[in-house]
Amino acid sequence: MDSLWSEGELLARGIHRIMSDRGLTRGRVLELFCGNGRVAVPLAAMGHKVVGVDFSFKFIEEAKKRARGVGVQERTEFIVGDARRIDDVVGSGSGQFDAVLIVWNSLGYYDRRSDEEILARSRRLVSEGSLLILANLPHRDQMVSRGRVVRTFGRYGDLLILEDMEFDPVRSVLSTRMYLLLDEGAGYVRRAGEVYSEMRIYTPTELGEIMERTGWSLESVYGDVKRLEKFDPARSPLTMVARAVTPS
């Protein structure tokens, strides 16, 4: 799993650069859908105070363990909870956080109304001018350009992950079937599980409109957050940075 953590650290460095370039070098960060803390823990090691929320108890326990292992448990808090009710999970009140963070593809697993509710409730937890960072999201242009059916393979220690992904351009939905395999050595592989999911894929324009309706104003757009590269609709993931504004 070391490669997953290495990837998380690279993502965290890019996110830290976005924040520090805007004067936020030691911020209070809320990461939604934090998973096992692969981004939150490195951000804490860079000096931020991070609250991570995920619905998976297993991931949250792994994140806590990792935070203790690198000595940042005092700057992290990991909570099992539903991002759709994030103000109930962390407690209501404006000004709790300086930045809200979502990495990769968690927006889109719910319907559009739920995604809007997530961003609207997150807005209530921050003061005007605070940051919203959506990092390395998949988007419609990228899905269309790479073809309708894609198969990927990755190895993380003894865990092998095979993904079959199919994009429906009419529904703008990405269907993914993930096969989990364990390498037991001597050429033997054991099937450990299978996961199927569907995710709505937004366009950058749609995401910008959702931000505007939920109290955020788009400030900057990048491609891969690890390099803060220029956004290439056909090739790069999508990173968007917005500021909290007073609704008109």
Image (spheres, helix red, strand yellow):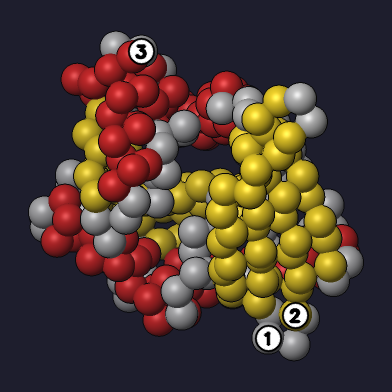
Task: Note whether residue 195 is visible.
Answer: yes
**Lower sequence index among marks 3 and 1:** 3
Give the class, few, some or many, for how many residues have Cα within 10 Å of label 1's Cα (few <14, many ≥20).
Answer: few
- Confirm or deny contact between disc 2 and disc 3 (CB under 8 A): no
Tell me the kind of residue under disc 3.
Val
Tell me the kind of residue under disc 2.
Asp
Give the class, few, some or many, for how many residues have Cα within 10 Å of label 2's Cα (few <14, many ≥20).
Answer: some
Is 178 left or right of 123, judged from the image as shown? Answer: right
Is 54 left or right of 220, judged from the image as shown? Answer: left
Distance from label 2 to label 3 (Cα)? Answer: 42 Å
Residue 71, quarter of picture: top left
Q: Where is residue 63 shown, x and y percent of the image?
A: 34, 32
Distance from label 1 to label 2 (Cα)? Answer: 6 Å
Q: Where is residue 135 shown, x and y percent of the image?
A: 56, 47
| Secondary structure under the numbered disc 1 in the rendered image | loop
Residue 52 higher or lower than 172, as above or below: above
Q: Which residue is mark 3?
A: 70
Q: Which residue is mark 1?
A: 171
Q: Which residue is mark 2?
A: 168
Is 118 left or right of 237, judged from the image as shown? Answer: left
| Secondary structure under the numbered disc 2 in the rendered image | strand
- The residue at the point 59 percent across, 59 percent down is 194
Closest to the observer, 196 or 54? 196
Distance from label 3 to label 1 (Cα)? Answer: 43 Å
Residue 93 higher or lower than 158, as above or below: below
- The residue at the point 18 percent across, 44 percent down is 96
